[in-house]
Image (cartoon, rainbow, N blue to C red):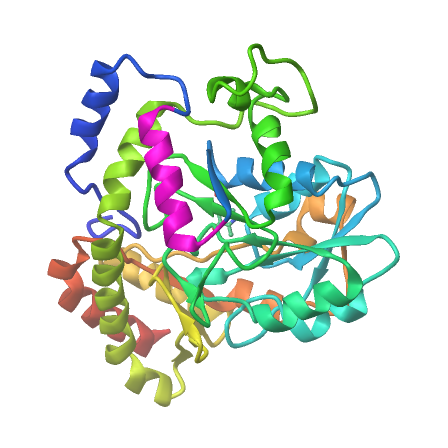
Amino acid sequence: MRIPFNKPYMTGGEIANILQAHANRQLAGDGEFTRRCCRWLEERTGSARALLTHSCTAALEMAAILADFQPGDEIIMPSFTFVSTANAFVLRGGVPVFVDIRPDTLNIDENLIEAAITARTRAITVVHYAGVACEMNAIMALAGRHGLLVIEDAAQGLMSDYRGRPLGSIGHLGAISFHETKNVISGEGGALLINRPELIARAEIVREKGTNRSRFLRGEIDKYTWEDIGSSYLPSELIAAFLWAQMGDADGITRRRLDLWQSYHAALQAQEEAGRMRRPVIPSGCRHNAHMYYLLLRNETARAAFIARLGQRGVGAVSHYVPLHDSTMGRRCARAHGDMMHTVQAANRLVRLPLWLGLEEHMNEVLEQVGLALGQA
Ligand SMILES: *Cc1c(COP(=O)(O)O)cnc(C)c1O
């Protein structure tokens, strides 16, 4: 595509940082760059502890271990999400129970959660779609009443907040992604935010192959041993060096993305009023990070025509999730509670438009092509 859907943004500082890690002969994880990235995350989110991981998927897997999932335990989550939200718990024998999303934000419908709770329910995993917060006050209150753990899949949510609280820092655990399709990136990468101090010690062990090596490295013990289950979840310093450059530019990245998002939003208002599609909804109290600009077209046919037309003009636009409840694994290992009407509608009607730094110079053309394609869809 001449104007692709996504193009990873480089701040310009990444290579210098990698050279620095190289010069330091510090290649394994938890060196100086990793420490800086973790501290930055803790300062920015207010989380008690941030641990870098290979990916958001790895952070979710760690969360499932820390939640002590037993085979048959249930976890309530949306079906309109990425596979890792569910897979992390299925790996521990957990059973995802899907509830429908809200038609406005496409986030889990907080009013449908309570009816899906059973004697086996242990946790709720929320997904902040497009970096727009779920209704966390209601969800945390509900979880408190039922003694459930809340895990935030904040893969798309860095630099967003809900009533002033950064996403990923509100539930008991939060997972962030630095995949190259996100706003702040390291190619592959992620972090686990631990908001309950009593989970920190075990999280460090799980991340270090089930050993207390983190304590050893801090000089707290004189040798380290096998203490728990775990795996290798920490990224190399080379990844953290790259990520540190991105974190230094996170405010600028967010500002520029918000400008692009706003250009779409303003330019498409009239088309929405004409009934051609629906634009994203940002509830009051949510400050978002412009992770995504999407449209909901009339139906699947209109969306296919729209994507094809833009593609002919060299503009990359893409659909999003195949609902998990409707996948091979979803049918085998999970179940849906209630109807999934809004989930199915979003899956069929949603299209994501290009949004990356550097798109500014193409924006007039993109807006013109989107307008023309909407007229024909
Ligand atoms: C991107 C994404 C993930 C996976 O992130 P990785 O870092 O690639 O593992 C999980 N959940 C959601 C909602 C995502 O958008």
**Camera-nearest residue between 51 and 117:** 51
Along the horizontal axis of the image, is 232 left or right of 285? right
Q: Which residues are magenta?
A: 31-47
Instruction: Determine the residue positioned at 49% across, 68% down.
Output: 349
Q: Name the quadrant of the C terminus.
A: bottom left
Q: Is residue 80 above or below residue 237?
A: below
Determine the residue positioned at 64% across, 43% down.
198
Q: Is residue 314 visible?
A: no
Magenta: main secondary structure equals: helix
Residue situated in front as seen by the camera: 252 or 350: 252
Q: How many marks?
A: 0
Residue at figure coordinates x 48%, y 27% from the top left: 234
Q: Position of residue 241 (x, y in %)?
A: 28, 30
Asked whether residue 359 is drawn in magenta, I would say: no
Name of the residue lying farthest toward the bottom? 273
Q: Is residue 33 magenta?
A: yes
Q: Residue 285: image x %, image y %?
A: 44, 76
Q: Residue 61, how many percent across, how many down?
A: 61, 37
Camera-side residue of 31 and 323: 31
Residue 266 position (above or below residue 303): below
